Amino acid sequence: MNSTSTRRSFLKAAALLPFAVAGSSATARAAYTAIPRHSGAHLRPSLNVYSFLELLNANAKDKSKGLDLFGACDFCAKVGFDAIDVTGYFFPGYPQAPADDYLIRLKRHAFNLGLAISGTGVRNDFTAAAPATRAEGVQRIKTWIEVAAKLGAPTVRAFADSQQPFKTWQQASNNASRDSVEAYLAESLRECAEHGKKFGVIVAVQNHGDFISTGAEHLSLLRRVDHEWCAAMVDTGKYLTPDPYADIALMAPYAVNWQIKETMRSAVDSPKVDLAKIVKILRASGYRGYVPIETLSMRRPDYDSYVEITKMLRDLQAAIRATE
């Protein structure tokens, strides 16, 4: 795919946008607009530390084993990342906010290494029928918005999909209509975004293959939220459509953060991501910012975080150079 055809595909997707969104939700708002971009694309590789899931969990149980967030920063600097995305799960005391002295030490450690902190994220369930469950998620995101501000991170990831103990958003919502779930989901996200506005932190809504499994569904929700401090985190492995690259192109103008996965589904036998194609989409949209990658073990017995992360970073860097 050359740059001309990529741009043509991007413009075609943008032209079809109103129809795609209207088909997703009759109540989707049209006021929400793409993020203004200037001076062309600028892409900076970052690492989502969930890639070190097993090692970080091991360290949480026994400090002599695995890897902590400081060690993850060391690795990122060593192999050439520009930033690190520090998921909240791996901070001491999660889901409560870490102590300020820990945040200050981590922030300075990253700075000394020349790393930016590109974001953080928590677990929440805004599809749940129980108002108390949604309120708990709102408070958690508000807490971590303030954590992100202390770290200098521009975004906090929020889920728009069901979480355990539920398996699907239909189960979580007691089979409520999609429109009613989108309405109360948007209300929760709007409250979080208003808090984010106070601290200069954007609420980045991630597609995760449940309530949001298409680009049109993703954009419909953001338009329903209709808040400048709420935008998209695009997970390239969680648009469950025949052509997920079209969904990615649709959402790129609204993205403030990413999770670039190794495969187009969270399964080892699914198609490998075409990083050159992803980068061309990013460039066509004029995206400027961090591009976090995330690798997953996907039950591979020979999975090695250090090896897989380094390989994917080199492939991403090559794709960025090849499309300059």
Image: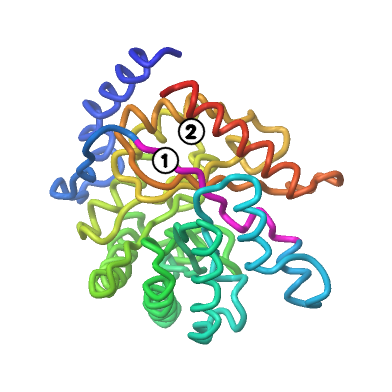
Residue at the limit of the structure toward the right, as seen here: 301
* Residue matched to label 1: 214
Mark 1 lies on a secondary structure that is loop
Count of residue discs: 2
Identify the amino acid type marked 2.
Answer: Thr
Residues at marks 2 and 1, CA–CA distance in whole angstroms: 7 Å
Identify the amino acid type marked 1.
Answer: Thr
Depth order, front residue of 198/22: 198
Q: Which residues are magenta?
A: 42-54
Image location (x, y in percent) of residue 179: 30, 55
Q: Is residue 76 magenta?
A: no
Q: Disc 2 or 1, which lies upstream in sequence?
A: 1
Q: Which mark is residue 241?
A: 2
Depth order, front residue of 111/44: 111
Mark 2 lies on a secondary structure that is loop
Q: Residues within 10 Å of mark 1 (few under 14, many from 20)?
A: many
